[in-house]
Image: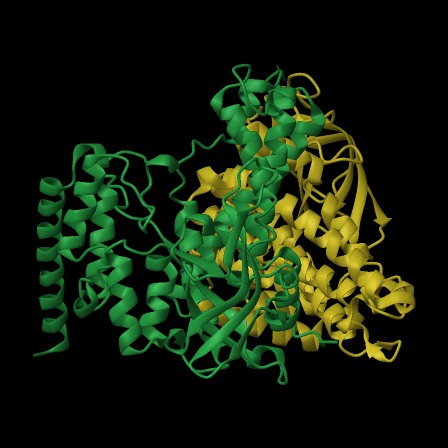
Amino acid sequence: MSAALRRETLQQDLDQFRTAVRQWMEANCPESQRQAITPEEQFWGGRRGEFASADAKLWYERMRDQGWIAPEWPKEYGGGGLTDQHARIIKDEMKRINARAPVYGIGIWMLGPAILEYGNEQQKQQHIRAIINAETRWAQGYSEPGAGSDLASLQCKAEDKGDHFLVNGSKIWTTAADKCDWIFCLVRTDFTVKKQEGISFLLIDMDNPGISTTPIGLISGESEFCQTFFDNVKVPKENLVGELNKGWSVAKALLVHERKLMAEMGSDSPRKIVVPNEAAHKYLEFENGKIADAQLRSDLIDYNMQMHAIALTHFRTFEEKTNGIRSAAPLVMKYLGTEAEKTKSELLLAIMGTQGLGWEGDSFTPEELDTLRLWAMSKAMTIAGGSSEIQLNVIAKSILELPQS
Amino acid sequence: MALVLNEEQRLLQDTAREFLDSNAPVAALRKLRDAQDPLGYAPDLWQQMTELGWASIILPEAFGGLEFGFMGLGVVMEETGRTLTASPLLASAVVGASAILLGGTAAQKETLLPAVAGGELTTALALEESHHHRPHQIATTLENQGGEFLLNGRKTFVLDGHSADKLVVVARSSGGTNDREGLTLLLVDREAPGVAVTRTIMADSRNTSNMTFEQVTVHAAAIIGEVGAGWSILEPVLDRGRVAIAAEMMGLSLEAFERTVAYLKEREQFGALIGSFQALQHRAAQMQAEIELCRSVLLQTLSAVDETPEQLPMLASLAKTKLNELVKLVTNEAVQMHGGIGVTDELEIGFFLKRARVAVQIFGDTGFHKDRYATLCGY
């Protein structure tokens, strides 16, 4: 078979698949599951997981039975066994009818792919199927009070006690850990070598004695993050993923999935976003078609120009990628994008004046209240996922090749 | 829209860089400055540049042009920014030629454009009347005297005005001092009776001039476009000039930045290369981030000239603003990071600093373009 013919056959196959998926979605996705979801309606699975409605349960079960909770994972563990292209079609068709994600969780987004790549057969049998069946909700145990930007300096230790590890220490920013069943952790297993080389990747059942979790109140008023403490926790040896002291490689592979997730979450926000231009027309005085407050007008122009330039740079990186051209642009985007988000939040508050400072109550619209909470949350954007300072270090080192001290 | 260079444009870039490095480095500008050269650029260099086709890059083939478009022009402008090359490229081959191309009669185009393309004729735009870019605040008058016209007024900051053969003058034929309506573009010989030109010595050692027009007689055949309808020609001409100077500023910024980063890797203090200090690393990294943004904006604006001209006004103002800010940031940091040697005339960084300040004023400073961008956005 010629290459052209093979391509054509493949395309026919994909087209047929798309038609089938479309028909199935139309027939099986309940109407109530085809509209924007609120945070309260999300199903995160696990022992404490509850469906918000009978329709939500039905929708999850149908998708699970179809193998489409994780379409690209192998069939033998409950996945769909499909190619990336086929999985893409399922996502496209869900988006087309505005279908909700049947289940949320970092088990599906981040840990699953890492176990499939680094885990052994027993771990795949135990954990992959449980993730797809929404039996386990996972937390991530990376950062520590003393190890933030300098993650590799983590001190939470796992001592070899023959048939088990004995874990002592604590993890911070463990998202929703008070609702999770299991936690995957980076732990120190060797104190005598270079810091990255003494780290291992452990799976820990949170029902183990010695584990406790407290929520952390944030400036936004939310407390989705927790701190989790480990006090002489016994963890079976078979819960080690990958080789002993090679956990840093697993963590790096997982980080790729984390970034992908963050990118998708941005475009999938359930909140109604207030745009600075619209806010300006609503909250500011105009004279002769111009915003009367010269400072705010100038700040708004700066922000809009920056966003215009950032959008064009996203297009450029896409075009460069298509043309096989390497450039420095992708490495500066996290820094620029998150700084611009913070600028936007500050600008919205300035435009809204005191009406943007309401904490709660009927004196403010839901959008106004949301704007303030998002402003508080935006402060985390230049800290999480590699702070702005870390991003600048990376640019200085890998693009400018400046000497390291 | 193209946000990457094609093969042809990359080739043009290599040729331009190679040619300018060996024929017109920054040292050539220093020589012109120190010799107080009366012309302010090297005519034989300009001749070579026109032989390479640079003076005809944006012109259609029908008028002896290369028809490489603004993406091609941008590549060459950027390289001349790296070497701070003094030449009539911007004033004559981009701005003056565009005025004739976009607004001129068939006769004007046929006689003038091939001569511009071949380097036998240079043009310049006589627009500004104050120390800030105010393109429709025009007091220079053009009076109709029954078929002939009389031109009176004064102009300033005319790029390459002292050496241009033909001046494209912006004058008011009707309306109030700040109206867009009532402006007229016309051609005047620099040596015509009643025209007086004084070269101004500017910080960047390049060429601008002041000029006065006293009872200058203008024939109807010298009017570009229609009397009173000059704004519709002038605005796109200025946008083309803005994106061209922005491309030069990109090259200027890149060169100053690269020289500075190289210095960070060789200068030692406190027993260490200063580039290992985080205080300097982060500032350099922030400049790199701004450079990436400017690169995308510039490419989009260059390609808009030929492909989506309806987007040009907003993009040109975005590009000029972004490049104004970049060039100021980078040249200031270049001087500061070089330390003491950065403020000596011996080091070439000072030439970049000075050219940057003049370039910021050409066809609109940051305030002008921020206001224009916001007005176009409706706030």
Position of residue A71 in the picture relative to residue A16 (left or right) = right
Which residue sits at x=77%, y=32%?
A: B129
Q: In which quarter of the image is the C terminus of chain A?
A: bottom right
Q: Which chain is painted in green?
A: A
Give the x, y percent position of residue B10. 49, 69
In this view of the protein, which residue sits in the foreground, B117 or A56?
Answer: A56
Which residue sits at x=58%, y=45%?
A: A340
In this view of the protein, which residue sits in the foreground, A99 or A311?
Answer: A99
Give the x, y percent position of residue A263. 43, 52
Q: In this view, does B152 lie above or below A141?
A: above
Position of residue B109 in the picture relative to residue A153 (left or right) = left
Chain B visual colour: yellow
Outermost front residue: A209
Quick check: can you spot residue A262? yes
In this view of the protein, which residue sits in the foreground, A274 or A224?
Answer: A224
Give the x, y percent position of residue A258. 44, 59
Which residue sits at x=73%, y=27%?
A: B140
Quick check: can you spot residue B147? no
Give the colour scheme of this rendering.
by chain
Q: Quadrant of residue A150?
A: bottom right
Give the x, y percent position of residue A389. 66, 59
The total of numbered circles placed on residues is 0
Position of residue B347 in the picture relative to residue B328 (left or right) = right
Q: Quadrant of residue B280?
A: bottom right
Q: In which quarter of the image is the N terminus of chain A?
A: bottom left
Q: In this view, does A1 lie above or below B117?
A: below
Position of residue A396 in the picture relative to residue B278 (left or right) = left
In this view of the protein, which residue sits in the foreground, A166 or B281?
Answer: A166
